[in-house]
Amino acid sequence: LMFHPIVTNWKRVLYMDSCMTIHSPHIHEIFSLPEAEGQLLASPDPWFWGRRGIKAKFVNGCPDPNATQLVKKLVGRNDMENVRYFASGLILFDTSIVQEHGGSFDTTVLEIMSLYQELSKLFVGDQEILSIYWVYVRKQFRVLPLAMFESNRVPYEFVKRVTQDPHIVTAGHKTRQVCAQRATNHLASRQ
């Protein structure tokens, strides 16, 4: 788990899915983002369902009414189409959000696991549950900046749109065969 108490050995942690591609030796700059102080940073979900809110991510034919009601209670709204969520493929967080919450270092992990048990039947992946937890329950989420303040490098973008742009990290779905295969298998399993 990326929020295990062992991460408190460092000030900041950058989690990346295995399909990420690092394009620049300047990855260390991401760790110095001032926006990360006491926060979790990630990018909004870039796919089409990200524009239709978390409702589009419900498992087909599911929504368990109890779990759906819990989501509405946690996010403080009934309109699930306006509940945004972040992509969990690249997450930067200040480990103080794990250290300083609750009575022990284990509190964050136990709360996330509890939420997984209650909501896992609604969602296929983890990003919706992590989003509900960090955005709405803990209120310690910020959007990852689009560019670094001094260098103008792009810390992360899902797809590297312009070849000359100084991207540090992008998702590798278009560039690495194993990632394309995983994405295809994931889509096939949801139908």
Image (cartoon, rainbow, N blue to C red):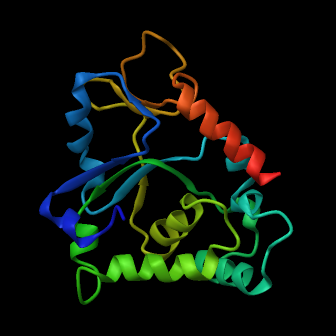
At x 60% / y 82%, what residue is drawn?
Answer: 118
Q: Is residue 29 left or right of residue 85?
A: left
What's the residue at 28%, 80% (across, down)?
101
Q: Is residue 161 above or below residue 95?
A: above
Quarter of the view holding residue 98: bottom left
Split into 4 quadrants, where in the image is the N terminus?
bottom left
Q: Is residue 137 visible?
A: yes
Q: Could you say where residue 104 lies in the image, as x and y percent from the top left?
A: 23, 86
Give me the residue at 22% from left, 63% from top.
7
Q: Is residue 39 above or below residue 155?
A: below
Number of numbered tags placed on the structure image: 0
Q: At 63% from the left edge and 73% from the top edge, which residue is drawn?
A: 120
When asked about the image quadrant of residue 177, the answer is top right
Q: Farthest residue in the left direction?
A: 9
Q: Nearer the viewer, residue 181 or 61?
A: 181
Q: Is residue 34 above or below residue 138?
A: above
Judged left or right of residue 150, residue 152 is right
**9 versus 181 height, above or below:** below
Residue found farthest to the bottom: 103
Q: Nearer the viewer, residue 80 or 65?
A: 65
Q: Is residue 182 left or right of residue 67?
A: left
What x and y, as percent, mark residue 110? 39, 82
Q: Quadrant of residue 144 in the image?
A: top left
Residue 150 seen in the figure: no
Left or right of residue 139, residue 101 in this image:
left
Question: Which is more toward the observer, 80 or 118?
Answer: 118
- Which residue is more in the foreground, 54 or 126? 126
Q: Residue furthest right?
A: 61
Question: Could you tell me residue 84's position as x and y percent?
Answer: 62, 57
Q: Position of residue 168 (x, y in %)?
A: 34, 27
